[in-house]
């Protein structure tokens, strides 16, 4: 039986690099943002490549959920990359049962700065941090899981320890050979990338591993700080529970 892992994060995180890491395991296949088309169709948000995304995926929530829960998979592990903002309020989360979950978090100030640089503006809803906290609580209660929370900065600064620690928290084996595979992947695009990779994945396509986090000074506008302040309490509650390494 395939072990299915759902990794939940907001945008402008290391979510695509993490997907690369898991896909480079010999026993794992990946699914890239399967609810993106549903989200765009429902909200009509004017995202880049709007029409291309809708044409590339099912817009039917129940159909997508069923495929993630029990659809065909030829690998022992299936890694699902999810954006928290794609899970609109009142979505039926029953499909998340019998799937192992993990939360990937990042300091909201860096998320807001990066998102604004990419799209010109940013709202709290755009970055999904509040929604991530809501999903963490809802899925924890629904599944009874002690869902691991992974801090992006820790992954970047200490990936050789955090990757096996994350696998252990998810009850996934991570022998030395597998760990090395998860830390070093080939350059370039993947057939598994969503059609939106053309717009969003330029940086990760140039990567071959987790790059150490850069210490950068960022100056946010009052409007950006308002977004940070709005979501910071949710981030801090998750940060307090993040997986630690020694």
Image: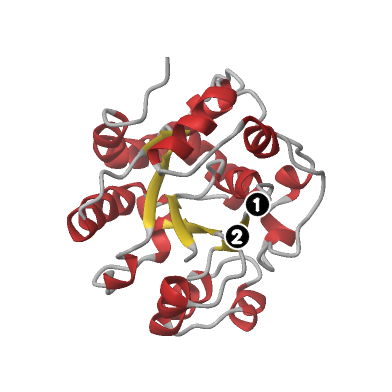
Q: How many marks?
A: 2
Tag shown at residue 23: 1
Residue 168 visible in rendering: yes
Left or right side of 96 for 121: right
Q: Is residue 218 above or below residue 121?
A: above
**At 42% from the left edge and 20% from the top edge, which residue is drawn?**
245
- Residue 152 % position (x, y): 49, 33
**At 46% from the left edge and 59% from the top edge, which residue is drawn?**
3
**At 49% from the left edge and 64% from the top edge, which residue is drawn?**
2
Q: Residues within 10 Å of mark 1 (few under 14, many from 20)?
A: many
Q: Mark 2 highlights which residue?
A: 30
Kind of element beneath mark 2: strand
> Split into 4 quadrants, where in the image is the C terminus?
top left
Q: Residues within 10 Å of mark 2 (few under 14, many from 20)?
A: many
Kind of element beneath mark 1: helix
Left or right side of 203 for 39: left
In primary-sequence order, the first of circles 2 and 1 is 1
Left or right side of 15 for 123: left
| Pointer 2 with pointer 1, Cβ within 8 A | yes
Q: Residue furthest left?
A: 141
Q: CA distance from mark 2 to mark 1?
A: 6 Å
- Residue 241 % position (x, y): 27, 31
**By what rule are the colours in the image chosen?**
secondary structure
Tag shown at residue 171: none
**At 65% from the left edge and 47% from the top edge, which residue is drawn?**
25
Nearest the eye: 87 or 222: 87
Kindly indicate the quadrant of the structure image that contains residue 159: top right
């Amino acid at each position: 039986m395939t072990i299915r892992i759902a990794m939940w994060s907001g945008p402008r995180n290391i979510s695509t690099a993490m997907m690369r890491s898991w896909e480079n395991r010999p026993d794992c296949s990946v699914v890239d943002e399967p609810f993106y088309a549903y989200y765009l169709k429902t909200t009509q948000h004017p995202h880049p490549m709007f029409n291309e995304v809708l044409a590339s995926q099912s817009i039917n929530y129940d159909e997508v959920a069923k495929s993630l829960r029990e659809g065909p998979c030829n690998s022992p592990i299936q890694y699902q990359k999810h954006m928290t903002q794609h899970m609109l309020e009142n979505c039926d989360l029953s499909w998340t049962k019998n799937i192992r979950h993990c939360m990937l978090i990042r300091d909201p100030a860096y998320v807001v700065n990066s998102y604004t640089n990419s799209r010109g503006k940013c709202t709290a809803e755009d970055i999904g941090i509040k929604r991530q906290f809501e999903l963490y609580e809802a899925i924890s209660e629904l599944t009874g899981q002690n869902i691991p929370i992974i801090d992006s900065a820790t992954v970047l600064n200490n990936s050789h320890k955090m990757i096996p620690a994350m696998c252990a928290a998810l009850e996934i084996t991570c022998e030395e050979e597998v760990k090395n595979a998860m830390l070093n992947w080939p350059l370039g695009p993947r057939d598994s990338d969503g059609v939106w990779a053309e717009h969003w994945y330029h940086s990760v396509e140039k990567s071959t591993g987790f790059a150490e986090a850069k210490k950068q000074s960022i100056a946010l506008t009052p409007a950006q700080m308002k977004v940070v302040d709005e979501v910071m309490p949710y981030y801090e509650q998750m940060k307090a529970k993040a997986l630690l390494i020694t």
